[in-house]
Image (cartoon, rainbow, N blue to C red):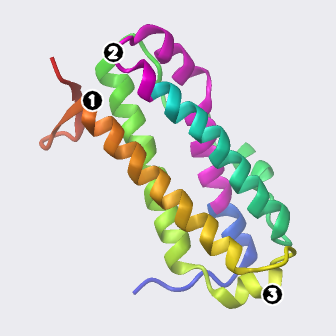
Amino acid sequence: MARKIVDIGELSELLGRAYWVETTLEGAGQWAAFMELEEQREVLFDICRDSRVHKETLEHLSNNLLGVDVIRESASLRKAPAGFGSDSDKITLSDLMRLERMALDLYCKILELTDPELIKEKWQGQNPKEYFEKLEWLVLQEEGHIELINSLSAVDDDDFRIHPIA
């Protein structure tokens, strides 16, 4: 089993990475894809809007955890992946699925590995359980996004790319 997250610096970095993923999902590349992809427009719109709410949730966690700054942590990460929001539906859906899976994996690992004692010690809000409740909600949200993308696509198991259904 992986070791627990007991250091606030490590937690800050991981939450910052999640914030970066949400920023990428909400970014200009997704809106460009939204404008180009009529068939997937509703799903892209919902995911972009949800990503804004996810960012706000991460900011809320950051503001309530002493020593956590998701905005500072995410600023040190690279920009969106090359090809994100390009002219190809295949690349756009593939990148979107990759980022949604990355977000889900991050939220699951952070939720599973965060030491409750660390949160009790660093939580500035009323109830430290809120931290875990918000992460559980984010996990459910990302699972829903993956289901939405899968409803538009067929996954090629050989290369894990997403191919639009004709």
- Amino acid type, residue under disc 2 in the picture: Glu
**Spatial distance from mark 1 to mark 3, Cα to Cα?**
44 Å
Q: Secondary structure at mark 1?
A: helix
Q: Is residue 29 magenta?
A: yes
**Magenta-drawn segment:** 15-43
Could you say where residue 118 lies in the image, as x and y percent from the top left? 72, 85
Q: Secondary structure at mark 3?
A: helix
**Spatial distance from mark 3 to mark 2, Cα to Cα?**
48 Å
The residue to which callout 2 is attached is 39
Q: Are marks 2 and 1 in contact (CB under 8 Å)?
A: yes
Pointer 2 local density, CA inside 10 Å: few below 14, some 14–19, many at least 20: few
- Residue at 52 percent of width and 62 percent of height: 107
> Does 7 appear above or below 19?
below
Quadrant of the rendering where the N terminus is positioned: bottom left
Could you say where residue 17 lies in the image, as x and y percent from the top left? 61, 53
**Seen in the image, is 22 located left or right of residue 72?**
left
* Sequence-first tag of 3 and 2: 2
Q: Nearer the viewer, residue 26 or 49?
A: 49
Q: Can you tell which of label 3 and label 2 is closer to the viewer?
A: 2
Q: Nearer the viewer, residue 72 or 117?
A: 117
The residue to which callout 3 is attached is 121
The dot on residue 152 is: 1
